[in-house]
Amino acid sequence: MADGILKVGTITTSSGSGTITLGASGETVDMSNGTMTLNSSMKMTPAFEATLTGSAQTINDASYTKINCDTEVYDTDGCYDNSTNYRFTPTTAGKYYVYGKALIDNNAGNMRNVVNVIYKNGSSLTLGAVNFHSSDSNDGEGASAFIATVVDMNGSSDYLELYVYGDTVSGGTSSVDNNERRTAFGAYRLIGV
């Protein structure tokens, strides 16, 4: 058969069901000149990323605080609440890659440790930490611990949140940085797993 162009509106199997194969083993199917539409099971959505931009968030010493990531970079399905609960409640069941980071700063230079925590349904799921001290005299000014994990979500009531914990030598307050995406929270659904 000679090379040519096949122009059709719909391709179906002869029986109306089953598998259609494009190309043979060792061949490449080039779809760069057109648009491909994926069904919902083939998309890595719902997905979102949000950052803290409104103002630096103050946190109390040695206590867990939810981070109010208030600016959406993207939110494909409207599943992230960036104004009230600051949580991601995906509407599609599956496995999700979730990540978070928060830069905690204490200008006094007496930070002992920083912990970033992803919560699922109100309980700690995973955490990342930076510990500055072997004694109270070895302290830092600030740090950001990046955390990520894969989590099963039921697609109806499960939700995820980002929390931080900062501990200083002298007590008092620290702040979560709101500049240049130094504090961010995001997730997306994995396909094929």
Image (cartoon, grey):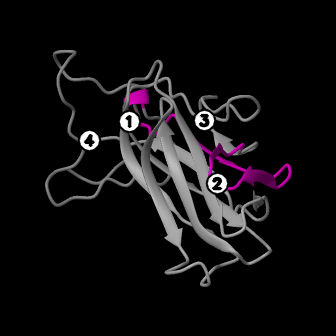
Label 1 is placed on what type of residue? Answer: Met
Foreground tag (4 vs 2): 2
- State the CA–CA distance, disc 3 to disc 4: 20 Å
Dot 1 or dot 2, earlier in sequence: 1
Q: CA distance from mark 2 to mark 3?
A: 16 Å
Which residue was labeled with disc 3? 76
Q: Earlier in the sequence, mark 3 or mark 4?
A: 3
Q: Disc 2 marks which amino acid? A: Ala
Farthest-out residue, bottom: 138
Could you tell me how far apart the alpha carbons at marks 3 and 1 are, in whole angstroms? Answer: 14 Å
**Disc 2 target residue:** 184
- For the residues carrying marks 1 and 2, which lies nearer the camera in this image? 2
Q: Which mark is residue 42?
A: 1
Q: Tell me which corner region of the image, top left, top right, bottom left or bottom right, holds residue 68.
A: top right
Disc 4 to disc 1, C-alpha distance: 11 Å
Q: Tell me if 122 is positioned left or right of 184 in this view.
A: left
Q: Which residues are magenta?
A: 39-68
Left or right of 36? Residue 54 is right
